[in-house]
Image: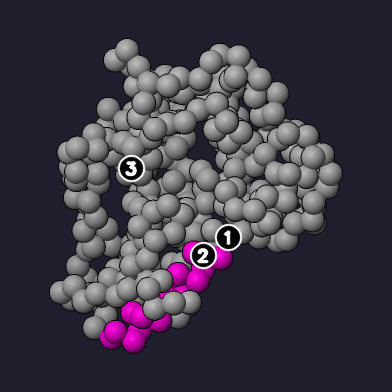
Amino acid sequence: MSVSDFSIEQKGDHIIGRFSAMASPCDLLIETQDCLLANRLTSLAFDETKRIEQKFSRYLPSNPMSEINNSRGKPVAIDDEIFRLLEFAKSCFELSGGMFDITSGVLRKAWNFDGSDNLPKPEVVKALMPYIGWKKVKYDKTSILLSKSMELDFGGIGKEYAVDCVAKICSEYAPTTSVVVNFGGDIQVTRPRQNKQPWYIGIESADENQGTISTLKIFNGGLATSGDARRYLLKDGKRYSHILNPKTGYPIENAARSVTVAAPHCIQAGLLATLALLQGDNSESFLHDQGIKFWCYR
């Protein structure tokens, strides 16, 4: 690890640890004046985040995901962590009625949400549809088998999973210290602050030019936001969300611009925020039915 991998900065009554990973700014807000403790927690967070990124990123060669996605119909050995994430992905698929499907990442070969008006040709999308379908994935505790040309993409839950893993490490190392783990807006607070004050978290506008539009108070638990502020296409006045329907290969119609959800754990909040976007017009009623706190912007 080099000295430039992360930094810490005194900020009033807390210290901020900073580094970059998973294409996001990663911050720890640590309720302490102890620079040694803050430095250690940030170091542990950096190591754990990089471990998860190295293991689960679909962009890196020679990692477990690369081996799985290039298996060409042959079984690949997996460990317990991969098995547990596959089980979670299975639950997500079932809870969403098939709308949350980690095999749909293959659609990135057709869609590039770069803010342009470059929509893919229908035949390109159609050609990828046979390679989507969670029920085609065969796995057990020791191995996984994908059909040829199929791929897995944990991007929809990976960052939230990393946030929860880092929060767990911080809780174990400093059980009496309140820490906010904030990876690009995916957040977990390890415990209430000693001074009983809340942490203040800003919610960004769905319009990337407006900045923060709301500030939330959070004492404990998870918070996650999903939306199309930075990933979208715009053609003939119509905005195309990056949230894709795995059953059609096309963006969800009438999706909310931004959904923020509070839940006990970040990975739960992230899942519910994404599931809400997948509901299109019914995002708000879906979230009301969950009995959770949420903020939805259109």
Q: Say whether residue 39 is magenta.
A: yes
Q: Nearer the viewer, residue 8 or 86?
A: 8
- Give the overall secondary structure of the magenta segment: helix
Visible in this render: residue 283? no
Which x, y percent locates residue 1?
A: 48, 77
Image quarter for residue 92?
Answer: top right
How far apart marks 1 and 2 lie (CA) works out to 6 Å
Crowd tier of the residue under label 2, counting other residues whose Cα lies within 10 Å: few below 14, some 14–19, many 20 or above? some
Image: magenta residue range: 34-51
Residue 212: mark: none
Which x, y percent locates residue 212?
A: 19, 45
Q: Are marks 1 and 2 in contact (CB under 8 Å)?
A: yes
| In this rendering, position of residue 99 left or right of residue 276 | right
Kindly state the secondary structure of the residue where label 3 is placed.
strand
Which residue: 79% across, 56% down? 77
Kindly state the secondary structure of the residue where label 2 is placed.
helix
Q: Nearer the viewer, residue 189 or 27?
A: 27
Q: Which residue has dot 2 on it?
A: 50
Q: Are marks 3 and 2 in contact (CB under 8 Å)?
A: no
Q: How is the image coloured?
A: one colour
Which x, y percent locates residue 138?
A: 78, 41
Q: Amino acid at mark 3?
A: Thr
Q: Amino acid at mark 2?
A: Lys
Residue 54: mark: 1
Q: Nearer the viewer, residue 226 or 126?
A: 126
| In this rendering, position of residue 50 left or right of residue 101 | left
Q: Nearer the viewer, mark 3 or mark 1?
A: 1
Residue 260: mark: 3
How far apart marks 3 and 2 lie (CA) works out to 26 Å
Kindly state the secondary structure of the residue where label 1 is placed.
helix
How far apart marks 3 and 1 lie (CA) works out to 27 Å
Q: Say whether residue 270 is magenta.
A: no
